[in-house]
Amino acid sequence: MFKKDKKSTVAPGQVDTLIGPQVVIQGDFHFAGGLYIEGRVIGKIIASNGEAAQVTIAETGVVEGEVRAPNVVINGQLVGDAYGELVEMHPLARVNGNVHYKVIEMIAGSTLTGRLIHSETVTVADATNVTPITPDVTIA
């Protein structure tokens, strides 16, 4: 009777997947909805194509690899490139890589070692890697 709209937005603060502060994930990570990272991810973070998605790197979060999602919120450390239609860099954001964006918000205190690259059409899906990799998860 009711169909879920795939193009719907992620509600502010919505967390569907949490990577806690003691978790280390090695490998590419595919997701939809709200992803909140307090731990460490070594590999690509890729939103499912056509799905509403937001990735948030919290203050304690570290990502070593590229991030591709419609909405990217950074308040931790990113070593790699970010691709997002909307990219927010909060006061504790530390980015060592390029940021590809349609709309960007940078708050005082955030740092970027790389380039800001504006585009009206940012490709957030990674078509070159369509086979998901099962990540190794280590809980310390």
Image (cartoon, grey):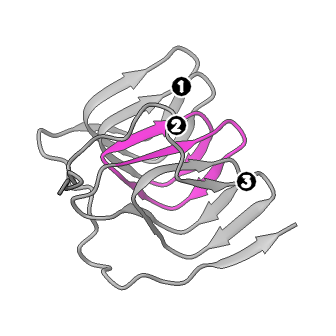
Q: Give the range drawn in magenta.
A: 53-80
Q: Residue at x 44, y 31 (%)?
A: 12
Quarter placement of the N terminus: bottom left
- Pair 1/3: label in front: 3
Query: Magenta span has 79?
Result: yes
Tag count: 3
Q: Hey, what amino acid is under mark 1?
A: His
- Which residue is located at x 56 percent, y 76 percent? 27
* Neighbourhood count class around disc 3 (C-alpha, 10 Å): few under 14, some 14–19, many 20 upward: some
Q: Which mark is residue 56?
A: none
Q: Which of marks 1 and 2 is nearer the N terminus?
A: 2
Above or below, comparing residue 24 to residue 3 in the picture: below
Question: What residue is pinned by disc 3?
Answer: 20
Nearer the N terminus, badge 1 or badge 3? 3
**Between residues 134 and 105, which one lies in front from this camera angle?**
134
The numbered mark at residue 74 is: 2
Spot occupied by residue 40 in the image (x, y as percentages of width and height): 68, 58
**First in residue order: circle 2 vs circle 3:** 3
Q: Inspect the image, locate mark 2, and give the three-letter code of the amino acid beneath it.
A: Ile
**Badge 1 vs badge 3, beta-carbon distance below 8 Å:** no
Give the residue number, with chain letter if any, for mark 1: 90
